[in-house]
Amino acid sequence: MAKGWRCCHLLAIMGRMSHRKGFDARRFARSQEVRLVAGFFIILYLVGGPLIWYFYGAGAALLALLCMTGALLFFLALYGLVSLLGRWANRDYT
């Protein structure tokens, strides 16, 4: 009896999986872009900052932190602008 229940449960799960949407390449590319950029800035802060501190001292590390934060804000502003322009260009005129 338990074996039959497992079979029905498995069929129910497979039925839900068949209603999933297909692979969306644009959504995947956008999520991959976000992951790569986030990973870059995390590595930049976690590796670059301490290395600058180690080789050049606290003053240089604080200045580097300021510059890295400025670069992050500049990138976010550009990314936001490009995203808004992309949405504006793809809107429907119906």
Image (spheres, rainbow, N blue to C red):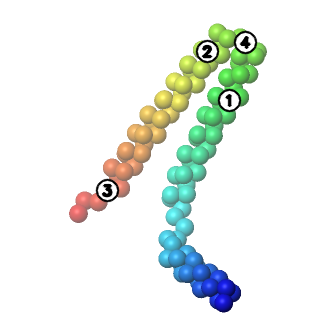
Residue topped by disc 4: 56
Q: Is residue 69 visible?
A: yes
Q: Are marks 2 and 4 in contact (CB under 8 Å)?
A: no
Q: Position of residue 59 (x, y in %)?
A: 64, 9
Q: The residue tagged with tag 4: helix, strand or loop?
A: helix
Q: The residue tagged with tag 2: helix, strand or loop?
A: helix
What amino acid type should be assigned to the residue bearing mark 4? Tyr
What amino acid type should be assigned to the residue bearing mark 2? Leu
Residue topped by disc 3: 91
- The image quarter containing residue 58 is top right
Q: Which of pointers 2 and 1 lies earlier in the amino acid sequence?
A: 1
Q: Is residue 40 above or below residue 35?
A: above
Residue at screen point 69% across, 26% down: 48
Q: Which of pointers 3 and 4 lies earlier in the amino acid sequence?
A: 4
Residue topped by disc 1: 46
What amino acid type should be assigned to the residue bearing mark 3? Arg
Between 16 and 8, the one nearer to me in the picture: 8
Q: Which of pointers 4 and 1 lies earlier in the amino acid sequence?
A: 1
- Tell me the CA gap for discs 4 and 1: 16 Å
List the single residue furthest toward the right.
55
Residue at screen point 37% across, 44% down: 84
Task: Choose mark 1 or mark 3, whichever is in front.
Answer: 1
Q: Which of pointers 2 and 3 lies earlier in the amino acid sequence?
A: 2
